[in-house]
Image (cartoon, rainbow, N blue to C red):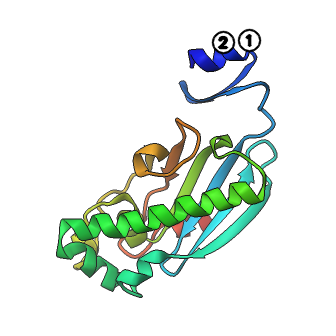
Amino acid sequence: MPQVIRSNSWDITVSVKDSEVINIEPGDTSKTSYGLAVDLGTTKIALLLVDLQSGETVDSQGIMNPQISFGEDVMSRLNYAMEKPANLENIKNVVIKRMDEAIGELCTRNDIEVPEILEMTVVGNTAMHHLFLGLPVKQLALSPFVPLTENSISIKARDMGITLAPGAYIYMPPPIAGFVGSDHLAMV
């Protein structure tokens, strides 16, 4: 922080979430702040790059969910993740890596810097939600199919391995039930 402030003669833009500084940039970059809306589907992942000033969608990209290599359907992926802890980490990391690459592609295509993305919201079915976060999934594979959490989650993008603004958060609305995810909540 001191380096950015001093090297730019105190001409900076500070992005704040609640009372936390999440990004400091040289100059006035207040007109170039972006967010991402992501639908983490079982087959495809849809990423929308959103201008946070206007609320307009700047660009979008659809990619295949690379978790398909661990099973084409949700139950196959849950079974894979339950086999051993390393599998849960593998299935989590493969989707994070591909999502991070897609974010870079969106930024390149739209001539923006990744640190200009200040927040990200991810929705998906309950299994995709749990696999993305690396949460235990055994309870989703057995009746009564109960999610591990009924709360929304905010987590630092950097802690998930996703490159955004240095202090950016990923927000995940809560899953509603075992087979009713936050993607349905987002549609409502």
Furthest-bottom residue in view? 72
Tell me the tag on residue 37.
none
Vertical arrangement, residue 80 with respect to residue 185, above or below: below
Front-most of 28 and 128?
28
Tell me the tag on residue 6.
2
| Residue at image coords 52%, 35% | 167
Query: Which quarter of the figure is the C terminus placed in?
Result: bottom right
Q: Is residue 129 left or right of residue 60?
A: left
The percent coordinates of residue 127 (x first, y second) are: 38, 72
Q: Quadrant of residue 23?
A: top right
Name the kind of residue labelled 1 in the image: Ser
The percent coordinates of residue 56 (x first, y second) are: 80, 54
Residue where numbered disc 1 is placed: 9
Vertical arrangement, residue 171 with respect to residue 14, above or below: below
Badge 1 vs badge 2, beta-carbon distance below 8 Å: yes
| Residue at image coords 36%, 85% | 71
Front-most of 34 and 53?
34
Could one spot residue 188 in this view of the protein? Answer: no
Q: Is residue 159 left or right of residue 184?
A: left
Name the kind of residue labelled 2 in the image: Arg
Disc 2 crowd, CA 10 A, few/some/many (<14, 14-19, 20+): few
Q: Is residue 82 left or right of residue 149?
A: left
Q: Quadrant of residue 186?
A: bottom right
Vertical arrangement, residue 149 with respect to residue 14, above or below: below
Q: Secondary structure at mark 1?
A: loop
| Residue at image coords 74%, 11% | 9
3D distance between C-alphas at marks 1 and 2:
5 Å
